[in-house]
Amino acid sequence: MPIFDTKQLKSQNGVVRTKSLFIETSYDDPRFWIMTLKEHDQKVKGGKTLLSLPRLYVEYCTDDPSEYTLAQEVFGSWKVWSALANADKRIQHAIGLARVEADVKRKSLAFREVIKDIKSGDASFQTKKWIVDEPWKAPEKATDGRKTRKKQTEVAQAAFEKEGLSEDLQRLKDEGYLQ
């Protein structure tokens, strides 16, 4: 059963309400307000609590970036969610910010799991290499690839030294396996 009822989300004619659902965008009757574009739920006169769309978005879309779970469990319909997501620019802006936050939270959770696997010794070589290479970072705008490679080498060298592997690294270089 969705959080919001169809009677709250649609007019008597069956038209999906969009701007009238939010305190920030409504020009209609305040009785239609059920949500806010703020980051946290908001209490209004009469003790009514307006649920935060950004908070709901992050809660439901961190594990489901398709937004389908949010559409079904909050609004009960993909059609209603689609209408909201394409409504007023202020609503679109709030959803855009929430999408970014959900992406960051998803990556944060993934990093925690990867780091946990590395610390426990369960991580594969590829996982460890992925952490060292940092592909999630935007590439620097250096036009000289030599500087970038040199910096990566220095960071890797510092990591080897910190872990006490510099002697093994030197032995591999002396035997000709590494340059």
Image (cartoon, grey):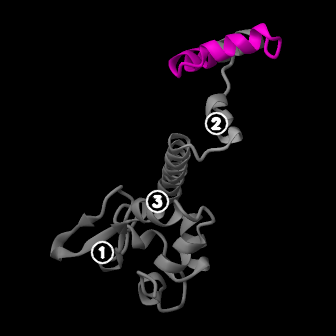
Q: Nearer the viewer, mark 1 or mark 3?
A: 3
Q: Marks 1/2: CA distance?
A: 54 Å
**Residue 134, image quadrant:** top right
Label 3: few (<14), some (14–19) or many (≥20) C-alpha neighbours in 10 Å: many
Q: Amino acid at mark 1?
A: Pro
Residue 157 vertical position relative to residue 117 in the rendered view, above or below: above
Question: Residue 31, how many percent across, how many down?
Answer: 30, 80
| First-in-chain label (1 vs 2) | 1
The quarter of the picture where the C terminus appears is: top right
Quadrant (top left/top right/bottom left/bottom right) for the N terminus: bottom left
**Residue hosting label 1:** 30
Q: Which residue is mark 3?
A: 58
- SS for tag 1? helix
- The mark tally for this picture is 3
Q: Is residue 70 visible?
A: yes
Question: Please, what is the three-letter code of the amino acid marked with disc 2?
Answer: Lys
For the residue carrying disc 2, how many other residues have a C-alpha within 10 Å: few (<14), some (14-19), or many (20+)? some
Image: magenta residue range = 155-179
In this view, the residue in front, 37 or 129, is 129
Q: Give the residue displayed 52% in from the left and 49% down from the top.
A: 113
